[in-house]
Image: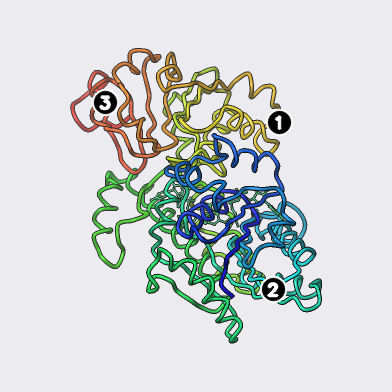
Amino acid sequence: MVVKNICCLGAGYVGGPTCSVIASKCPEIKVTVVDKSVTRIAQWNSEKLPIYEPGLDEIVKARRGKNLFFSNNIEKAILEADLIFISVNTPTKTFGNGKGRAADLKYVEGAARMIADIAKSNKIVVEKSTVPVRAAESIMNILKANNEPGVSYQILSNPEFLAEGTAIQDLMHPDRVLIGGEETPEGQLAIEELCSIYEHWIPRKSILTTNTWSSELSKLAANAMLAQRISSINSLSAVCEATGADVSEVAVAIGLDSRIGPKFLQASIGFGGSCFQKDILNLVYICESLSLPEVAAYWQQVIDMNEYQKTRFTAKVVQSLFNTVSGKNITLLGFAFKKNTGDTRESPAIHVAKTLLDEGASLNIYDPKVEESQILYDLTHPSICESPEEVKKLVKIYPDAYSATNGAHAVVICTEWDEFVTLDYREIYRSMMKPAYIFDGRKILDHEELINIGFHVQTIGKRLPRPLSTRMWSGTAVV
Ligand SMILES: NC(=O)C1=CN([C@@H]2O[C@H](COP(=O)(O)OP(=O)(O)OC[C@H]3O[C@@H](n4cnc5c(N)ncnc54)[C@H](O)[C@@H]3O)[C@@H](O)[C@H]2O)C=CC1
Ligand SMILES: O=C(O)[C@H]1O[C@H](OP(=O)(O)OP(=O)(O)OC[C@H]2O[C@@H](n3ccc(=O)[nH]c3=O)[C@H](O)[C@@H]2O)[C@H](O)[C@@H](O)[C@@H]1O
């Protein structure tokens, strides 16, 4: 079979960009991205796409209506497809057995049941969603138990490694593409079919093929190890603050060791995003289910360290502001979980905002890409607050950094947006209450310059001197 028709179930952060790039690189293949959500599909078909991702608009505009389609007609897309990507969400379970840790596979199962109900011809079904090891077995069981006579399936695992904010770049030039499949002749044939799609733009040597379970586990392992690096450097940031070492200098020094490497050593307010925490919790749950408590505890520590970092940073904000923020105006610059995305899922900014609101602060918030409605939705969620009305009174969203900081007691940098680096901090200082504080949770600002302006500055993993005018003696005092 030569794949001519692809269907993708799930038009989210993975399904949308991945299929747009496939459509752009394989003009002879018809790619249809479907979703249950009518709103989401309408947004994909509009001028304003549902997600912000640099480079995405151009690709979608170039291919939409030619060989790239967004649709709610799931039945038609499944019937037509030779190959189906499952790119649905796999959130952490919020109920029952494994609550708070196991992956909730109801959407994956729902997708498998849809395929089984609708398909009338053979299909290659590709797990793109991040799933627990051996999920492909469950999908196959569902498909086999419900299939039309004569219809057969091959299940492949093809985890996605893109990061938000650089998704298009990551999809165009991936470090590797991973494809896992059955070690049978039919399984190997299906792997070859999927390889031939990626080979339109990715060299064969960058396409790695493995057995299904290795592929599924490698995705969880990659996210766990990336997050582990962040927790490791964040743990060291606490040691730096206690000793006078500078975590950025430590990161450079250790990153130059080619066995360690320089990436993912940026100490921060803590990692966020929809996947690191969920995938590690999933790994922890799998280990516990496999009676491997020591392994489970090892990975759990990556999450615990992240919680510690978020709490430690916010406690520092409150402590520095004379141990009370009640009635004070605090500005959060950035609300997305990282720059170049409008995604706020598990954003550390939510943790900061919640703690400050609990302490009685009023918040001014500005983010270049997060919609006001999203910020208010996140902060009034039942898991965050008991009184949405109270939150709405205490939180104001601003259209730019200058209006957001006007009259504030303190500024907290929650996201490392480039535009925050080049703001006129003299102007901001003039408009703020005094003493004026900046808490740089992303280590992006020129701290020396800010101190010279008059700010009290706190950051992660480095002690900073007080502004000159407040020093009792020269040089060494810390805020
Ligand atoms: N967000 C990211 O950067 C990455 C996510 N992943 C994984 O990819 C998967 C998808 O993640 P996102 O795209 O972020 O999720 P998302 O929540 O943005 O999108 C999932 C979409 O699937 C739709 N859906 C659910 N069941 C469906 C069904 N039966 N038929 C049609 N549509 C259905 C939902 O309506 C939703 O629009 C997850 O397993 C995630 O762990 C992997 C790599 C990167
Ligand atoms: O499975 C997924 O969803 C994806 O998860 C991450 O991608 P993403 O969460 O989009 O973004 P990252 O760049 O990994 O950043 C995650 C969080 O860690 C933080 N981070 C990252 C790097 C660093 O050095 N320090 C640090 O604090 C970021 O600010 C952000 O809050 C992985 O990088 C992707 O490979 C993976 O496909």
Mark 2 vs 3: CB contact within 8 A: no
Mark 1 vs 2: CB contact within 8 A: no
The image quarter in which residue 182 lies: bottom right
Question: Cα distance, mark 1 to mark 3?
Answer: 38 Å
**Which percent across, then down, holds residue 50?**
57, 39
Q: Amino acid at mark 1?
A: Glu
Crowding at mark 1 (Cα within 10 Å: few <14, some 14-19, many 20+): few
**Which percent across, then down, holds residue 169?**
40, 52
Label 1 CB less than 8 angstroms from ligand 1:
no
Q: Which of 440 and 13 lies nearest the eye of the viewer?
A: 13
Question: Cα distance, mark 2 to mark 3?
Answer: 66 Å
Looking at the rendered image, the disc whose residue lies closer to the viewer, 1 or 2, is: 2
Instruction: Check the picture and name the quadrant holding the C terminus.
Output: top left
The image quarter in which residue 183 lies: bottom right
Residue marked by disc 3:
451
Q: Is residue 29 above or below residue 237?
A: below
Crowding at mark 3 (Cα within 10 Å: few <14, some 14-19, many 20+): some
N-terminal label among 1 and 2:
2
User: Tag on residue 386?
Assistant: 1
Q: Is residue 309 visible?
A: no
Q: Is residue 348 above or below residue 116?
A: above
Q: Residue at x 26, y 65 (%)?
A: 258
Q: Residue at x 81, y 71 (%)?
A: 146
- Label 3 residue SS: helix
Residue marked by disc 2:
122
Q: Is residue 380 above or below residue 98?
A: above
The image quarter in which residue 368 lies: top left
Q: Amino acid at mark 3?
A: Ile
Looking at the rendered image, the disc whose residue lies closer to the viewer, 2 or 3, is: 2
